[in-house]
């Protein structure tokens, strides 16, 4: 037979066990070690619920904050799906409009507009219209950002050299401002084809700006990734002058709601070599 | 673009202002560097970290670049920036950098003791780590501390001026550079002249061959004066002109924050007013 087994029994087990033939006894497990039956977490759950029901000052005030939508997950999921469907719908409509213009030899925007209104009003209503979004920028966003920075909202500033706002405080406020409705322009990008695109932001998602642009034939919706792009925007002061700022998309990859309470940190900028012009 | 991150400013400390003859000499140095093909030059002001700094932010920067060198910048097209190098000896006597860094484009640290080196590599918010290459290094450089510093985005500078002076400093220079290249594993190394006179300037070929001799990789040599050095400039400029690298002042089509020359003048104001673009069709 196996020699090793015998060796283990005669030399090792004899030294440490009383009965070397049976080193582990059957009734070794004591009764106290047996697992007790549980109530399936019922008692602790009840205790937890009871503490919630108590009428303490803390409970009363905190219940106001805890109002959550019963099916928040499905609502947010549906919103995403609806957003995606909206954007793809607009893009398809633009494609179809371009196709019709190509088939009918239309090269002017006005011409296409007239043609579509006459022959295909359904498609015309599906197309994105820059004009519809313009008030979102002019009336809403400009007023909002002026109010945020403490500039006079209604009146234009005559002498811009006498403008007195704190530059660093303004930058801090801009880093957590809302950009839906802002007229942005791609100033620099790794993708050279995107440089110069200009339009109104209709949605500021985590990794993209979705903007409406004015095109040659039709207005278009474009999703510009924030990664590897520098955006440029202006805050108008009067008819000729404006304050100029730019957004580094690489450091801006947060949703606007997350950005508001966020503490930004400066990181190494080795990935932003594209930002330097004359390399 | 070719960057020289270190042209010595003829003044040490705040007590003695730079004389006119020194500045004319500096101008000839700048013109020589322009002749050698450099496009971005940085004037380096050295001060002790434990010295007393002026309270007024406007007096912190003694260089007055726009007034003194505006004509050079206009005629030759080079861009001139300012830099402060803080000699760090005893970290306990130092002061906070936030106010000092407002007045300069780049902040560098020059540790001369072991504790100073630990402070500079871990805590300080700097763009550049440099050493006195003419003398012995304060300690043996450890790969761990130098590389963690480089991973944070701080670059290590090699100054080749001391290789051109007397024989003793040349010997030290060789061993120091070997040590720096070894401990940084040739990552994030930038090269600058540290020139005090026009004779101490070299062009990219001369510097490249010197560094190749001292063990820096072939591709790293040209990067050390171009891309990496411009990243130092970008990092330094962004610190002053942006909120934590998110929103930047200015920066339209043709300019960026490094190339924006007006920025040197309006640095303390942090506002840029431009012509308004009306929403015209693309």
Image (tube, coloured by chain):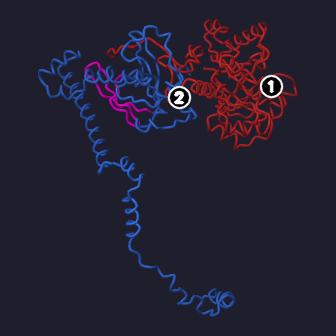
Q: Nearer the viewer, residue B20 or A112?
A: B20
Q: Is residue B80 above or below residue B219?
A: above
Secondary element at tag 1: helix
> In the picture, which chain is blue?
A
Q: Which residue is mark 1?
A: B163
- Say if the magenta span includes residue B14: no
How busy is the neighbourhood of tag 1: few (under 14 within 10 Å), some, or many (20 plus)? many
Q: Residue furthest left?
A: A119
Which quadrant of the figure has residue B23? top right
Q: Chain ID for label 1? A: B
Disc 2/disc 1 C-alpha distance (Å): 40 Å
Main SS of the magenta part reads: strand
Q: Is residue B115 above or below residue B82?
A: below
> Residue A77 location in percent, x, y?
30, 46
- Say if the magenta span includes residue A199: yes
Q: Which residue is mark 2?
A: B243
Which quadrant of the figure has residue A257? top left
Instruction: Determine whether, in the image, residue B224 is placed left or right of residue A79.
Output: right
> In the picture, which chain is red?
B
Q: Quadrant of the N terminus of chain A?
A: bottom right
Q: Which residues are magenta?
A: A198-226
Tag 2 and tag 1 share a subunit: yes
What residue lies at 73% left-to-right and 22% top-to-bottom?
A: B193
Which quadrant of the figure has residue B174? top right
Q: Nearer the viewer, residue A109 or A34?
A: A34
């Amino acid at each position: 037979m196996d020699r090793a087994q015998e060796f283990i029994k005669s030399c090792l087990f004899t030294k440490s066990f009383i009965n070397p033939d049976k080193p582990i006894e059957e009734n070794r497990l004591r009764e106290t070690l047996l697992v007790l039956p549980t109530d399936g977490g019922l008692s602790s759950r009840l205790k937890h619920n009871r503490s919630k029901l108590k009428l303490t000052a803390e409970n009363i005030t905190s219940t106001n904050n805890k109002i959550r939508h019963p099916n928040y997950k499905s609502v947010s999921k549906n919103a995403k799906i609806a957003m995606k469907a909206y954007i793809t719908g607009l893009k398809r409509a633009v494609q179809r409009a371009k196709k019709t213009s190509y088939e009918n030899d239309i090269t002017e925007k006005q011409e296409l507009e007239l043609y579509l209104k006459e022959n295909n009003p359904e498609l015309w209503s599906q197309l994105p219209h820059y004009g519809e979004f313009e008030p979102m920028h002019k009336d809403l966003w400009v007023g909002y950002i002026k109010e945020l920075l403490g500039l006079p909202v209604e009146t234009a500033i005559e002498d811009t050299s006498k403008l007195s706002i704190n530059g660093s405080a303004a930058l801090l406020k801009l880093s957590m401002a809302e950009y839906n409705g802002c007229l942005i322009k791609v100033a620099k990008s790794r993708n050279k084809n995107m440089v110069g695109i200009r339009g109104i932001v209709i949605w500021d998602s985590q990794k993209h700006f979705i903007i409406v642009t004015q095109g040659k034939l039709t207005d278009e919706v474009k999703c510009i990734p924030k990664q590897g792009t520098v955006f440029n925007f202006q805050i108008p002061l009067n008819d000729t002058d404006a304050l100029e700022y730019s957004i580094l998309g690489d450091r801006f990859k947060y949703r606007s709601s997350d950005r508001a309470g966020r503490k930004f940190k400066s990181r190494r900028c080795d990935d932003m070599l594209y930002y330097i012009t004359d390399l | 673009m070719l960057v020289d991150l270190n042209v010595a400013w003829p003044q040490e400390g705040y007590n003695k202002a730079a004389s006119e003859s020194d500045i004319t000499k500096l101008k000839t140095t700048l013109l020589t560097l322009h002749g050698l093909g450099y496009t971005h030059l940085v004037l380096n002001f050295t001060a002790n970290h434990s010295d007393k700094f002026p309270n007024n932010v406007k007096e912190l920067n003694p260089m007055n670049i726009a007034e003194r060198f505006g004509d050079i910048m206009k005629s030759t097209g080079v861009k001139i920036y300012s830099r402060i190098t803080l000699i760090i000896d005893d970290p306990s006597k130092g002061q906070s950098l936030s106010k000092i860094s407002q007045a300069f484009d780049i902040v560098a640290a020059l540790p001369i003791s072991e504790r100073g080196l630990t402070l500079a590599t871990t805590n300080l918010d700097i763009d550049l780590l440099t050493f006195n290459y003419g003398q012995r290094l304060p300690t043996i450089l450890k790969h761990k501390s130098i590389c963690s510093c480089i991973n944070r985005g701080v670059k290590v500078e090699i100054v080749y001026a001391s290789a051109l002076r007397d024989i003793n400093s040349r010997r030290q220079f060789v061993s120091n550079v070997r040590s720096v290249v070894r401990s940084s594993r040739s990552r994030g190394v930038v090269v600058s002249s540290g020139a005090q006179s026009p004779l101490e300037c070299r062009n990219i070929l001369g510097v490249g061959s010197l560094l190749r001799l001292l063990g820096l990789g072939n591709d790293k040599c040209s990067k050390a004066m171009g891309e990496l050095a411009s990243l130092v400039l970008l990092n330094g400029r962004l610190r002053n002109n942006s909120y934590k690298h998110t929103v930047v002042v200015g920066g339209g089509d043709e300019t960026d924050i490094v190339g924006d020359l007006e920025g040197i003048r309006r640095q303390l104001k942090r506002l840029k007013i431009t012509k308004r673009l009306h929403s015209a069709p693309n």
